Amino acid sequence: MSVFSKKIYCLILLFLINSSVAGATGSIEVFAIDCRTNEERQLPEIEIFHNQHSYGAWRAKWQESWDGLTVDEQFEEGVYYIEYKSIFGKIERKKVTILNGVKQKVYLCMDKLNHKKSQITPLIDKLKNGEKYTIQNTFRGSIDYGIESVIIKKNNGVYYAQFKKRQKRLSKKEITLLRYFEIELNLLRNRRKFCSWANEFLLSYKQNRIEIIESSCEWNGWGYLLKKLGWKAFEPKKT
């Protein structure tokens, strides 16, 4: 093969490779989940970005929103970002790498939150030795009603939690759990949605009383908190 023929061959090969790469496409199937429990959640509107430019916005149909959304686009191979709003009203981003011929399953954490960046100071961090505070939750549903309380105490630098007639010493992990619970609850203060039930929280510390109504239908922070503390919360029927 002459030098000229070799050059022509290399040019044709490069053209075929570039054509193949340019035509490489993949698709996206998006799911919304609670990352604490891996339970599915309702999928919000999503927007997809590529090279800092919006590729488009999608909203799942109601019947699809709990089962995932297949975005009917053929995306070229590359790195994309999916933007969505969490249950706390924060805009979050999820990085996705699209591969040729692959339907990429993407799971969005609806409860994603950087608690360490919060400006909220939880009551548990205000407690001094000999002090306590109470978290009271009143459930109000279409056919259900109930009241439960957890009392948090600090004695000699040790934290305790009391639920009904049971009391336990809190570990560092459980203290963090209570701290995160209150941060999330405060962020949900103005995130009300139409729901068939609601949780009316009353946090009492010294002479201070904080009332917060939580009706997001998606958080279930109270049930998750008590479960992690080894207890079981009252569960209203979801109608």
Image (tube, rainbow, N blue to C red):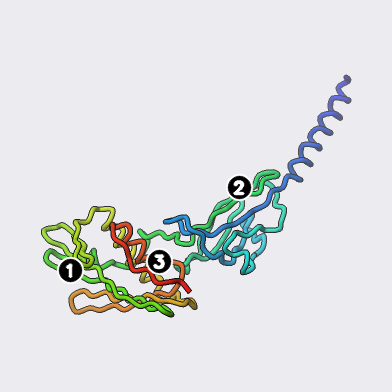
**Residue identified by numbered label 2:** 97
Mark 1 vs mark 3, CA separation in Å:
24 Å
The N terminus - image quarter:
top right
Looking at marks 1 and 2 on the same chain, the residue that comes earlier in the sequence is marked by: 2
* Location of residue 180 by image quarter: bottom left
Question: Which residue is identified by label 3?
Answer: 220
Q: Residue at x 47, y 55 (%)?
A: 38
Which structural element holds mark 2? strand
Mark 2: which amino acid? Answer: Thr
Gap between marks 2 and 3, in whole Å?
32 Å
CA gap between label 1 and label 2 equals 49 Å
Q: Secondary structure at mark 1?
A: strand
Using residue 60 as the reference point, say whether residue 107 is left or right of it. left
Q: Which amino acid is tagged 3? A: Asn
Can you identify the residue that label 1 sits on?
132
Residue name at image x 28 percent, y 58 percent: 229
Question: Which residue is at the front of the view, 31 or 180?
Answer: 31
